[in-house]
Amino acid sequence: MTASATQPDLILHRGLFATLDRANPTASAVAIEGGKFSAVGHDREVLPLAGEHTRIIDLKGKRVLPGLIDNHLHIIRGGLNFNMELRWDGVRSLADAMAMLKRQVAITPPPQWVRVVGGFTAHQFAEKRLPTIDELNAVAPDTPVFLLHLYDRALLNAAALRAVGYTAETPEPPGGEIVRDGSGNPTGLLLAKPNAGVLYATLAKGPKLPFDYQLNSTRHFMRELNRLGVTARSTRAAGSRTTRRIMRSSRSLPPRGN
């Protein structure tokens, strides 16, 4: 173990660390000073380095992982819309998912939509299927519902079709298909043929949050990323003036990224 001559800012001990050092592959404690590791070793070696102002955290045997850097994260869209989206990640049955949807519909004020934007697949459900349009209409007769399944299709209930204005007279969009019944009326199923343009163009028709709500949504999104271990991110563009203002205003953004 090598140690700094000064007192560390932070000591983590009674943990499980993988060092990637073949000579010393594991450690139970580390000291951090100025944002960098100043000592790596065992509790008996690292704890004596603590000074009067050193913060000491007992990890109680937990594994420690480095912060994750995500280089393909839709951080702008994700942040602006996080508070408007219902998540079906890990939900085991369609019945439970539909119960979640019904609860969300009950608390969603007009003109907002209920959105489930990816993060799930029909194969995760015990029923091995997606909801039908009739099932969506039953739980949300007046609130628009938009479900994005992977990048291949979207399901819209009747209220969502009314909100986006899709009718029998609506022409086929470029890069997609509006599935219709025998009379030419849209059924609520949109297909990505040959790309997802129609799916995202339709989603973009939904109402946006006011600036303060967008800021709040972005902060919640950042906290969720931090909870999952993401500490830095990269995004291709700064987006609109409003987006740049939100990114500057949010105090919960990870400290690194571009």
Image (cartoon, rainbow, N blue to C red):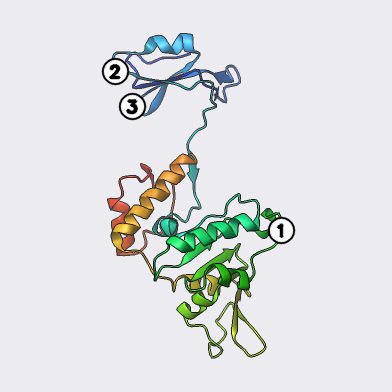
Is 123 rendered above or below residue 182?
Answer: above
C-alpha separation, residue under disc 1 versus residue under disc 3:
53 Å
- Residue at left offset 48%, top offset 71%: 144
- Residue at left offset 63%, top offset 67%: 152
Is 150 rendered above or below residue 159?
Answer: above
- Give percent across and percent down for residue 138: 57, 70
Is 193 rendered above or below residue 167?
Answer: above
Question: Mark 3 — residue?
Answer: 34
How many numbered badges does the structure rendering display? 3
Is 3 rendered above or below residue 170?
Answer: above
142 relative to 179 in the view: left or right:
left
SS at circle 2: loop
Q: Amino acid at mark 3?
A: Gly
Question: Mark 2 — residue?
Answer: 53
Question: Mark 1 — residue?
Answer: 127
Q: Nearer the viewer, residue 48 or 21?
A: 48
Is residue 236 something one can see in this rendering? no
Judge the density around disc 1: few (<14), some (14-19), many (≥20) Cα neighbours within 10 Å. Answer: few
- Residue at left offset 32%, top offset 15%: 6
Q: Nearer the viewer, residue 238 or 183?
A: 183
SS at circle 3: loop
Is residue 24 something one can see in this rendering? yes
Q: Nearer the viewer, mark 1 or mark 2?
A: 1
Quadrant assignment, res 231 = top left
